[in-house]
Image (cartoon, coloured by chain):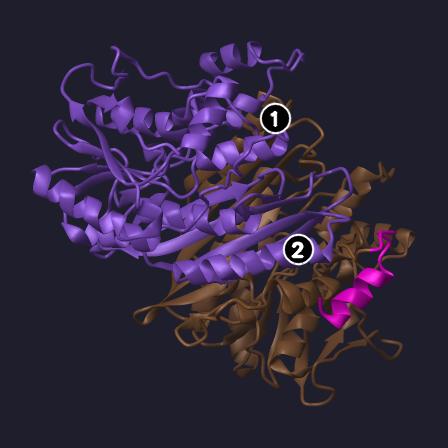
Chain colours: A brown, B purple
Amino acid sequence: MTRAAADEAGRGHSGRRDPAIVMKHGAGGRAMRRLIQETLTRGFVDVAVDGYGIAAMDDGAALRLGDRWLIVTTDSHVVQPAFFPGGDIGRLAVAGTVNDLAMMGATEPMGLTCALIVEEGFTFSDLERVQQSMVDTCREAGTTVVTGDTKVMGRGELDGVVINTTGVAIANTLVRDSGLAVGDRIVVTGNVGDHGMALMAHRHHLAIDAELYSDVAPINRMIRDALAARPGAVSAMKDPTRGGLSSALHEMAEKANVGMQIREELVPVNPVVRAVAEMLGLDPMHVANEGKAVLGVRGGDAAVQAVLAALRRHPAGANAAVVGECVATRPGDVVLDTGLGKRLLSEYEGELLPRIC
Amino acid sequence: MTRAAADEAGRGHSGRRDPAIVMKHGAGGRAMRRLIQETLTRGFVDVAVDGYGIAAMDDGAALRLGDRWLIVTTDSHVVQPAFFPGGDIGRLAVAGTVNDLAMMGATEPMGLTCALIVEEGFTFSDLERVQQSMVDTCREAGTTVVTGDTKVMGRGELDGVVINTTGVAIANTLVRDSGLAVGDRIVVTGNVGDHGMALMAHRHHLAIDAELYSDVAPINRMIRDALAARPGAVSAMKDPTRGGLSSALHEMAEKANVGMQIREELVPVNPVVRAVAEMLGLDPMHVANEGKAVLGVRGGDAAVQAVLAALRRHPAGANAAVVGECVATRPGDVVLDTGLGKRLLSEYEGELLPRIC
């Protein structure tokens, strides 16, 4: 076991002698990235010579296929509850995987796999709702499930249902999450924090006047149009899921070794989400999204306007906005201009809310 | 909900009013196949025009890629316990997916995805053992993990660890599990029942003089050599995992609409497995394997001998044997010649042992 992992586990709340996994290891933040880097990816032959594999820790892998790329991306979905305002685990599974493919430049999925693990006693009617939701979301994204797997675990061995979806697609041009350079503008495709805040409000029965809905949606067609609007202008992409916008920005800045300056007032947030977040002492920039993307855009104002216009033609991109830019100072850091001053944008070590996706 | 599904659920032991999933729905037998056919695959656009997708219910999907096939196959592994005699969940996950690819004719995996779900409190040392086992098994199979996903569920929300592996590979020639024709010989690549019986003995602390070991292993290189030994001779393949040899034979006979005659004395079984099975009143033909394949072979004795010789050159294929042949009578049925008479080979409706893989 590596030292960082041991430290981590030692700081955990497991209470056991043998260092153990704690919730933050699955939360999308720094603790998870360390676990993956120091333990989970160790020893695997990397395919870097012919492709873009595990060491890149991107949203998926890119494997060489002649002069094109086969993009493969996987996610297991454990969201709780399985049905939530604005979506369900089936929609989440399809959209999550379709969007991860899109983030690497592959906006036309060839197909998805669907591996279902169900707890004994899960009702047929709920299973059918989930299945129908997957069918509908596939249709929306222009794809289908091509193969699957079904396992049942005993009562009490699994809390409800979990779904793994893995997607495959061809990309002619690969977009990496590490592709930012100084001068690139940072674009967010819409309001941040909707998914996590809707789940939080629902799970904790918060009494809110307006209903909050998850943004969960496949955005591959919107991304296709944004990429086509100005070929080569999009330098990097990432979807701000677990860990929210903050984790996505940090990861992109670190990988590209550029500084990032974000103007807080430019980050689009639904006013109800902002109000609830304030009430709970949270920053919407730390809260998960399931139908949003962060884009790096180069090529000056004309390119940025072309990409923004393409995004805004889609309902999911109506609030797309430039929120900042990449700079040469403080490489790897994300500096937030709050309007009252500047500070480093924080990134959560662990989880705001477990089983968010 | 379909009528068959309702009947099924009604016969289940869920005790709820709303029909629910029971253990047999994940057991690899008829109940699972009905659930998949009548519920899980319903409504998805099939890719049959360009590929070989969900409706085929094979070990994976085959998607058109010019004049070749992209094979994609997925499995979630929930085996309990995670460490068992002869293997562990990591080895099982890699071998299971590598073998599913091989069963479709794709014996050189481009890469695997690995999506891990871990229970809070699972120890780092166990996680590292599992991870190292995946690294080692990948090396054995000549492949690697190219991307992954990590989720953590709370204590009591998941029993230990589950791993989804999805594999991608290119096949020049597709081998279907439905490819049998009258006259084809049925070859089994080695002793049947080892995996399931080792788990059963271990889990129930059976006192047995000789230790039983799972056969879990990647057999893609053995299958590559068998296919190359006589190109075109292998008409169909399937790995007899959940449901054992019996389920695999039934599925192959039904899909090809051929009869099958199997001579019981020719089916290779480790004598210890046979003895334990007898003691427990089980038939090794119903017990799961994780390093075996069933092949249909055409082209007469010369072809069969060439394929057998190629298999036997590998340790995993040392006991490869012809066990029967396809006939025109009783299409879809598997007739077992016991030496004392003939009877229909039974197939279990549900599970012998839950969480076998």
Q: Look at mark 1 in the image and give the residue it sits on.
A: A126
**Horizontally, is B212 left or right of A254 in the view?**
left
Residue lying at the far front of the rendered structure: B209
Q: Which residue is mark 2?
A: B127
Magenta span of residues: A1-17
Q: Is residue B55 above or below residue B92?
A: above
Residue drawn at x 70%, y 72% as measured from the top left: A250
| Position in image of residue B74 (x %, y %) | 45, 45
Residue at the limit of the structure toward the bottom, as seen here: A328
Q: On screen, B339 above or below A278?
A: above
Q: Position of residue B184 (x, y in %)?
A: 15, 32
Circle 2 sits in a helix, a strand or a loop, which is it? helix
In the image, is residue A315 part of the stretch drawn in magenta?
A: no
- Comparing A291 with B170, the one in front is B170
Q: Quadrant of residue A171?
A: bottom left
Q: Are marks 2 and 1 in one subunit?
A: no
Alpha carbon distance from label 2 to label 1: 33 Å
Q: Residue at x 63, y 38 (%)?
A: A88
Who's the residue at 36% across and 25% down the image? B246
* Image coordinates for residue A311, horizontal then vertical, percent: 54, 62
Few, some or many residues within 10 Å of mark 1 (<14, 14–19, 20+):
some
Residue type pointed to by label 2: Leu
Q: Chain of mark 1?
A: A
Q: Secondary structure at mark 1?
A: helix
Residue B344 lies, in percent from the top left, at 30, 13
2 or 1: mark nearer the eye: 2
Residue B296 shows in this picture: yes
Which of these two is toward me, A271 or B206? Answer: B206
Question: Numbered disc 2: what chain?
Answer: B
The answer to which image quadrant residue A69 occupies is: bottom left
Answer with left or right where residue A142 lies relative to residue B135: left
